[in-house]
Image (spheres, rainbow, N blue to C red):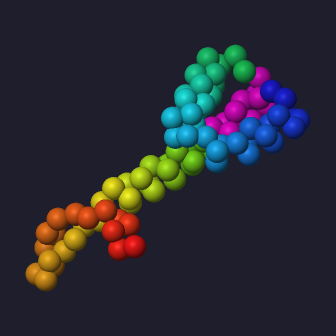
Amino acid sequence: MDEGNGSAQQADNIEQMSFEQALRALEEIVTQLERGDVPLDDSITLYERGEKLRAACQKRLDAAQARIEKIVTGADGKPSGTTPLDADR
């Protein structure tokens, strides 16, 4: 793997990737690491990028889940339904 400018650009573009693009990139890294034919230094670099991709995917999943629904509780404290999280705006 090239440790030069390409790696910095790859790290920077994770935030611009769609969830699907980040997940595909993560799957490619896992496949490469599972093959076991990647030199150690490159494996470490791949692992680090994979962790960044995993974190970005998790962040997007968490944000999506929060936006999907917010539990509305009635006066008795029991759930009475759901509303979109941003309905308060």
Q: Could you tell me which quadrant the N terminus lies in?
A: top right
Which quadrant is the C terminus positioned in? bottom left
Q: Residue at x 81, y 42 (%)?
A: 8
The residue range painted magenta reads 39-50
Task: Work out which residue is located at the far front of the displayed protein and give it.
Answer: 89
Percent position (x, y) of residue 36?
65, 19
Q: Position of residue 5 (x, y in %)?
A: 87, 37
Res. 64 visible in picture: yes
Residue 57, x across and y down, in percent = 52, 45
Place of residue 54 in the rendered image (x, y in percent of width and height, measured from the top left):
56, 43
x 31%, y 62%: residue: 84
Query: Does residue 83 appear to the left or right of 34 in the view shown?
Result: left
Q: Residue visible at 60% across and 25% down?
A: 28
Q: What is the quadrant of residue 9 in the picture?
A: top right
Seen in the image, is 81 located left or right of residue 39? left
In magenta segment, residue 61? no
